[in-house]
Amino acid sequence: MANEFTGRDMACDPAQLVPQGPGVDPAHQGCAITGSGVNAKTISGAQYINASYTYTRTHLWRNFGVVIAFAILYILVTVWGTEFFNFAKSGGGALTFKKTQRAKKVAAAKVAAADEETGSSSGSSGTEVEGASVPDNEDQALKEISGSEAVFTWEKVCYTVPYQGGQRQLLNNVNGFAKPGLMVALMGASGAGKTTLLNTLSQRQTMGVVTGDMLVDGKELGLEFQRGTGFCLQGQRYSLPVSVHTSGH
């Protein structure tokens, strides 16, 4: 109201002029609205809100400062509350993951191969899994299987394809890395280039020009990289599980 009424003079409606009646001199009529002057046919907007609401334009900036101060106070109280109060109930439960049948078979196969080489009996201490003996240190065996420490990095990756007699760039200086043991989420809107990036990183592009550096532990990718990566499609979402092995062969 302070913005709209300040600096505006509003004409009084004839029905609001007093006194009214036959023989009344219009020069002696005045507006019957709050804030009008004597014998005035117009009313100032600033006088109207001051007389009606005891509010002036100077109060506008005062109240604006009050709103800013309240917002800052609210943020400070929220930060303090989240720092010193914990509303989540703690429990004594633990999160465990069930081992898949594939992991158990791989561990059993390693045990069977070790028994054949050493000549030891499969009836020793362990747990039977589908006819094979699994040692008590199964977790250690699985850790050795997936214990790769190689880091996959890509830097300034660009991908250009021919388009209507010219060129169109689909990837522009994309950087990133994937560490073993960590899940990397590639997120973006539809058409952002997620599938294009995964195809490029997995060395599965069949057209266009790819530039940039894609390295495993700082070394160029070999022919075995494509065989060591998986590319899965499920529910219109794509994933690139990278498994890089650093064995001697």
Image: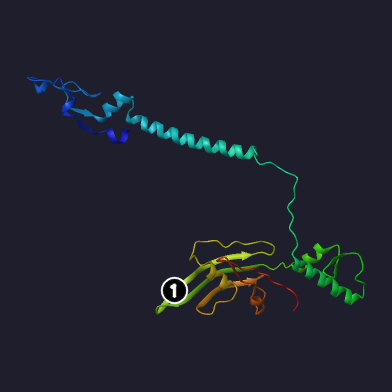
Q: Residue at 80% across / 62% down in the picture?
A: 139
How was this image coloured? rainbow
Q: Quick one: 43 or 124, which is closer to the camera? A: 124
Q: Residue at 10% across / 22% down in the picture?
A: 27
Where is residue 137 drawn, in percent x and y?
A: 84, 63
Q: Residue at 49% across / 64% down in the picture?
A: 190
Residue 36 versus residue 114 in the image, above or below: above
In the rendered view, does 16 fall on the left or right side of 131? left
Q: Residue at 10% across / 23% down in the picture?
A: 26
Residue placed under numbered mark 1 in the picture:
168
Q: How many marks?
A: 1
Residue 190 versus residue 51 in the image, above or below: below
Where is residue 80 drawn, in percent x and y?
A: 60, 37
Where is residue 120 drawn, in percent x and y?
A: 92, 73
In the rendered view, does 66 fall on the left or right side of 108? left
Q: Quick one: 37 or 248, which is closer to the camera? A: 37
Amino acid at circle 1: Arg
Q: Quadrant of residue 114?
A: bottom right
Where disc 1 sits, the SS reads strand
